[in-house]
Amino acid sequence: MPASPENSETVVDTSLYLHAELLPNIRHITLYISLPANLSSQNTQPLITLSESRQAVSVSLPKPFNHVTDTIKLPARVNEASRRILATNRQGAATTADNGLRTGRREFSFRMQIDDSDDLLPRQDALIDDFVPWTAADMSPSTRLRCRACENVVLDTPRCADIQSEGSGPEGWTWKDLPSGNWAEMMDFWHCHKPDPPEGHGHGEDPNAQTKGYGAANQVMATAGTVLVDVATFLVSEVDCRGLKKVQPSPEETAQKKEISLNCAKCNATIGIEDAVAQGWRLFKTSLSANISLPSSTWETHPIETIVAAQLLELIERESARRFVIHCGRPYGLLLWVFNPDFRYSSSSAEHNVSSQRAMKVLFQEVGDVDSILNPGQGSSLSLEEVRVPESVYEAVERDLKARNEMLPASAREFREWRVGALHRFESE
């Protein structure tokens, strides 16, 4: 990051910016180094050095700007030949204009090969990894949930535990992970040799579809004392919740079949929706913080973008979709193309972190008419999945994408008609 000038000779823009991306499929790291174009008029060339461990790159400027230096940790260790590549820093120099700025930036880009012996290189089975925050395995019988905004507890001691007879089972919540969204249909396909129906049922509905659990009509139902967990929500029984109020949709929203909203009784933040089919309430993970286990007093939250990224990854895995329309029920929205579901990057921007960040690279566009994209008049060859989120979540995703776009080097911020951004992925410790 830029340092303060020490004398009048250095009263010029000397800001450095470093950005590195790991491309695991081709086993390369692309490194961008950006500095003000006005330094080229003074014939200033950066000094680029690779650390002894080959896991970090340092950049400094010669006199009279030798007080300017920055270091970035690479997402993976590179091979020894990368030292020679970085030494040819005059190659790859380019002057590009920053978006919205009159002053240009001079960029250097390098592609370095990853060391074959690097055991820390992430696995390539990106979608098989755990990418969902707060699964049933993460929770305990004493887990509590509260409003993320005002700390109003909405899920405390299960009421059904008070009426249990002694010895009937452990008191506390039972947490269960829900299967994939299309589990019932897939079970129906997989059972190529289904059990024969009992005699006398003829060719009507197969009763085994209910008893064996593979029928599409076999619905998941909310049960008191049990919390069912999916990628983005907790499905709970109404009797288990407190501190929430139902908000009926307006007449216009009712015409669009909008669900009944569940708002915090204290701050009126949207916490979830009523699920009439499952006869329960769905609480949004994006609106909650959790106290995992007593007697700990620690409450944890997950960034909104990691929960939305998990939703997208689940749809990629389940539907093989890569393009999505994210909206909050308004006419406008975001058209997303998940270009790379799993990559790592390091940056010396304001979000600078010593460790590399795990994210999904996303190309995005703002759209003014969501309905025309989801329901084209003459059909469309573009396969799209709809992702509807609360308004606060939509605003957070839009804000994060735009911030990551500005974080990128100027030459990497656009791809044709798309803007380039990133959403951080959840990564278990």
Image (cartoon, rainbow, N blue to C red):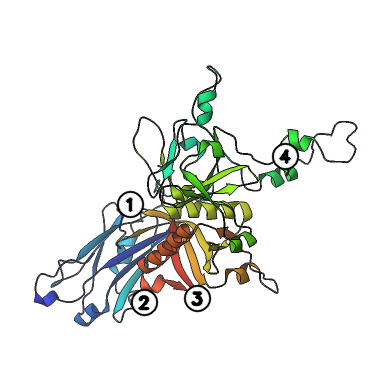
Q: Which mark is residue 214?
A: 4
SS at mark 3 in the image = loop
Q: Which mark is residue 416?
A: 3
SS at mark 4 in the image = loop
Give the residue at mark 1. Answer: 355
- Say above or below: 234 vs 390: above
Q: Quadrant of residue 41?
A: bottom left
Q: Quarter holding the C terminus?
A: top left
User: Residue 247 placed where, x, y %?
Assistant: 53, 52
Nearer the observer, 152 or 232: 152
Q: Residues within 10 Å of mark 1 (few under 14, many from 20)?
A: some
| Structural distance between the alpha carbons of marks 2 and 4 | 54 Å
Q: Exactly how many numbered labels are in the figure?
A: 4
Circle nearer the N terminus (2, 1): 2
| Structural distance between the alpha carbons of marks 2 and 1 | 27 Å
Q: Amino acid at mark 1?
A: Ser
- Name the residue rendered at 11%, 77% in the picture: 9
Give the side of residue 211 with respect to residue 351, left or right.
Answer: right
Circle nearer the N terminus (3, 1): 1
Q: Can residue 363 be seen?
A: yes
SS at mark 1 in the image = loop
Q: Kindly indicate whether the residue at mark 4 contacts the one at mark 3 (C-beta within 8 angstroms).
A: no
Q: Amino acid at mark 4?
A: Tyr
